[in-house]
Image (spheres, rainbow, N blue to C red):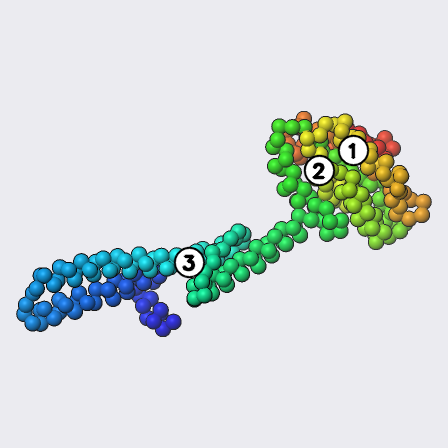
Amino acid sequence: MRFYRATSFLFPRNFHLRLFTLCFVAVHLPLIAFCGTEVALGRWDWRVFVPLLLATVVGSAAAIGSVWALLAPIARATAMLRALQNGERIATAPEGGTDLIGDLLRGVSHAAAETTARIERLSDAAETDVLTGLRNRRGFLDAVAPLLQRERTSVMAMLDLDHFKTVNDRFGHDAGDRVLRAFAQRLEAGVRRSDLSARWGGEEFAVLLPDTALDEARDLIERLRAGLRIAPLEAGPGLPITFSCGLAVARDYGTLAQAMRRADEALYEAKRMGRDRTTA
């Protein structure tokens, strides 16, 4: 560190140029010594000077090029560290040998792997509903956006558990949480792999059915409702769980927000009509 600090006056903002300057001076020392000796002896031999000068120039170029190549892994490691500080993900890191540079690259690679894994865990946590394990609102919107860019029919479904306030009032919030988790499992098992489901908030759930006609979407929701009748999900004795649903064809509206607003309006229409039904 002493030599590093002592030479900091040479290009203090550029380590590469500082190193190249030192290499340039070191390579030219024999030429300088030759010139000094010739002057001291009062003679000058061009036959020795010219080859020595050419060898010095070639040696300088080779030394600078070699040092530049050797510094490339350090530059890459520095760029990776800067990316990590900015919260970016590092896909792959270069591998080094068993020398000092290899140790540096392995350290940076390990830090990159740990940081990337931490970012992914935080990202998953930020987009997942803790209670049900489904996507939360943010995760749903992020996943839905690319699907709606297709020129195909997709259906937006908004589902709301009926009389859920009664569940919390009669049996407590723990029972309400169990109902939400159980319904989320039924919902996830009842939709297709291509469908996206999420807990939108409270007792409300959202489902996007891509590449699906309105009648197909209604049939799928009704199969889910039939499953609740065959194998009832009860919050407590005498209180089976049902849900209301509103549907909207996403392509019929300009934005996802408008399609969801229409599905939400259809949902409340289903509730006004007596609940435990699907409207579009």
Residue 278 locus on image (x, y percent): 81, 31
Residue 55 locus on image (x, y percent): 20, 60
Q: Is residue 227 left or right of residue 35?
A: right
Compared to residue 189, the image places residue 102 above or below, namely below
Q: Is residue 196 left or right of residue 30?
A: right
Q: Is residue 166 visible?
A: no
Foreground mark, 3 or 1, reads 3
Decide which of tag 2 and tag 1 comes sooner along the chain.
Answer: 2
* Residue located beneath label 1 in the image: 220
Amino acid type assigned to the residue bearing label 2 in the image: Asp
Task: Report helix, strand or loop for mark 2.
Answer: loop
Q: Is residue 37 visible?
A: yes
Say whether marks 2 and 1 touch (CB < 8 Å).
yes
- Report, in whole angstroms, how far the alpha carbon at label 3 lies from the one at label 1: 56 Å
The residue nearer to you, when weighing 256 against 105, is 105
Task: Report helix, strand or loop for mark 1.
Answer: helix
Task: Report helix, strand or loop for mark 3.
Answer: helix
Residue 12 locus on image (x, y percent): 34, 62
Residue 225 locus on image (x, y percent): 84, 36
Checking the image for residue 73, the label placed there is 3
Furthest toward the left, the residue is 42
Residue 200 location, quadrant? top right
